[in-house]
Image (cartoon, rainbow, N blue to C red):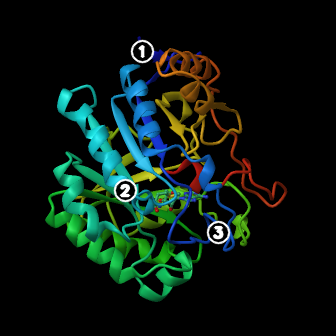
Amino acid sequence: MDMIDPFGRTISYLRVSVTDRCDFRCTYCMAEDMAFLPKKDLLSLEELDRLCTVFIEKGVRKLRLTGGEPLVRKNIMHLVRQIARHLESGALEELTLTTNGSQLSRFAAELADCGVKRINVSLDTLDPEKFRQITRWGNLDKVMDGIDAAQAAGLKVKLNAVALKDFNDAELPEMLRWAHGRGMELTVIETMPMGEIDADRTDQYLPLSLLRAALERQFTLTDIRYKTGGPARYVHVAETGGKLGFITPMTHNFCESCNRVRLTCTGTLYMCLGQEDAADLRAPLRASEGNELVADAIDEAIGRKPKGHDFIIDRRTNRPSVSRHMSVTGG
Ligand code: SAM
């Protein structure tokens, strides 16, 4: 039975945050001294696999592992290999992940071996000093090595950059040329008001309508119908021959076509990235060896999927729309 929400949207895409921990502290994502979930609350890899399997049986065709940083979860490749059996059986169409790239040189070949075909790497700047500044703890060289390893392993790499006013806006044309020159797509994302951070989001927020207008002074952008199952809208860039995606949760709400739900590493299911309502799947998962209870809990949760998010960033509403950080539910 397909999962269909109250607005008639079929849910076929599951994003799984396998840990809320990360080896970076990106300033727009986290506070520097983050409190993480207690380890005792985490689902085991076996439990995560069991939940993913129930979702796949209920119609999920695309599954993305995220975090925190998914590749810092201990034994993560065990989970990847387990889930990959659903690729082999044909039940799952795509298994992918979103990563900061820091651990990719270790894992790229094995990911490809498991049947992962493409990955998203988050990268906001090509300048090593600015990279250190925005990630607080990151090392650009390691990420570049990771991207090299991913491409060498045959993985298709898409870069995601959060557009940040007066930080990387002037650099984005160069990043676009660089990414397309290496055969990678680039997607730019508007910053979302999720969780308390040390900075002021109104200072960082750059509406992508402004960025697009600026890029159009240098590039010929043509809207195209290309879709990857996510919320990005794409343009073709005539000068580079590549594709550029825009993810605009703030300036253009795309919730009408939402096909996804998000599971955290504690078994909490969020039906919307931008709302607080959630369902606990850990209790029904642990209450019985069979999957009926958890399948019923998923149906009940999908029946509560809201129409959309209500993100606001302005000086008057200077607080997060949701209290949890992006690192809890992942990108
Ligand atoms: N660690 C992995 C990574 O860096 O890709 C996966 C998790 S990270 C939370 C997923 C994506 O969310 C990254 O591209 C990150 O830049 C983005 N992100 C984090 N906080 C955000 C926010 N407040 N608004 C928009 N994007 C955000």
Residue located at (58% from left, 77% from top): 166
Circle number at residue 204: 3
Q: Is mark 3 within 8 Å of ligand 1?
A: no
Mark 2 close to ligand 1, CB under 8 Å? no
The residue that mark 2 highlights is 75
Q: Which residue is mark 1?
A: 2
Q: Which amino acid does the dot numbered 3 rest on?
A: Gln
Mark 3 or mark 1, which is nearer the start of the sequence? 1
Secondary element under disc 3, as helix, strand or loop, is: helix
* Mark 1 Cα shell of 10 Å, populated few (<14), some (14-19), many (≥20): some
Please state which amino acid type lies under the numbered disc 2.
Asn
- In x, y percent, where is residue 275? 68, 38
Q: Quadrant of the N terminus?
A: top left
Q: Earlier in the sequence, mark 2 or mark 1?
A: 1
Is residue 45 visible from the viewing direction of this image?
Answer: yes
Q: Disc 3 or disc 2, which is closer to the eye?
A: 2
Secondary element at tag 2: loop
Mark nearest the camera among 1 and 3 is 1
Q: Residue at x 72, y 55 (%)?
A: 313
- Disc 1 residue type? Asp
Tell me the distance, in whole angstroms, between the alpha carbons under discs 3 and 2.
Answer: 36 Å
Cβ–Cβ under 8 Å for marks 1 and 3: no
